[in-house]
Amino acid sequence: MTQQNMDHWNERADLAATFRWAARLNMHEGVANHFSLAVNDDGTQFLINPNQAHFARIKASDLLLLDANDPNVLDQPNAPDPTAWGLHGSLHRLCPHARCVMHTHSIWSTVLACLADSTLPPIDQNTATFYNRYVIDQEFGGLAFESEGIRCAGMLSDPAKKVMIMGNHGVLIVGSDVADTFNRLYYFERAAETYVRALQTGQKLRVLSDEIAEKTAKELDAYPGQAEAHLAEIRAILDDEKNTYTN
């Protein structure tokens, strides 16, 4: 193992744990989709999963350390997936508040992204979490190479918008660290499932008022320690199982 692969070890372990857990929750897409984490002050150096690796097997030492300002990484050995570079490289270069970026094609979020109206109404606590806190991309332009990544980064310039519902594509979540971002990814997938299943009943939805939805979202924004505890418990479960994510 090279010294580079030992740098930022706790951040690597946190990120590796979320890959393993996302696979367990069936929130993966074969050997596609990517999670990344900025590790320097301006956010331009970041960890990301290696090209064509399954989430269920990713280890802390596997993660690539890239510089968003160095496009030559695509010509080097162990180059990242070009769509990972296009999307995550653009975000880490242009949106310094997006310290961690998680993009998946998880089923329920992608179903929501395929609806002509991809709005997520506040019908319960989980859906209310995201009230006025997401953007909907309605201009899918194909695979997320660099031009597509730059366009998406432009839609996430507002730090208050931490979720992009990627029309015809999937979901992209940003956050302050691994715990914050994975917790948001998890709850957005739960919220999307609740909404889609509610639609399937064919009955009228019980939608919260704007006032209560915003109040609930603010209360959850300030709820102490949940994201950190969620990740700590995930790591504890994996550790109990002697999982290899920290290798």
Image (cartoon, rainbow, N blue to C red):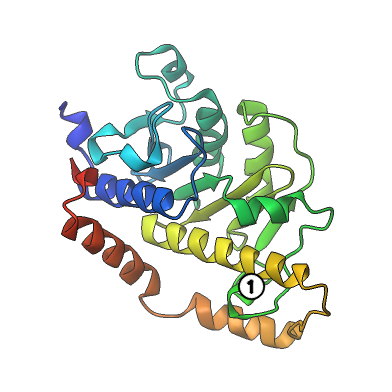
Q: Provide residue 142's location: percent of width, then percent of height.
A: 71, 30
Q: Provide residue 84's location: percent of width, then percent of height.
A: 51, 31
SS at badge 1: helix
Say which residue appears at 44% left-offset and 63% top-offset: 183
Quadrant housing the C terminus: top left
In the picture shown, does residue 118 fall above or below 243? below
In the picture shown, does residue 39 fall above or below 217? above
Query: Is residue 124 left or right of 78 when viewed as pictured?
Result: right
Quadrant housing the N terminus: top left
Looking at this view, name the residue that lies furthest to the front: 201
Q: Provide residue 72's location: percent of width, then percent of height.
A: 44, 16
Q: Provide residue 198's location: percent of width, then percent of height.
A: 72, 72
How many labels were placed on the picture?
1
Query: Is residue 191 left or right of 236 when viewed as pictured?
Result: right
Say which residue appears at 49% left-offset and 44% top-offset: 28
In the picture shown, does residue 98 fall above or below 247? below
Q: Which residue is mark 1?
A: 127
Query: Is residue 11 left or right of 155 when viewed as pictured?
Result: left
- Residue type (three-letter) at the residue carrying disc 1: Thr
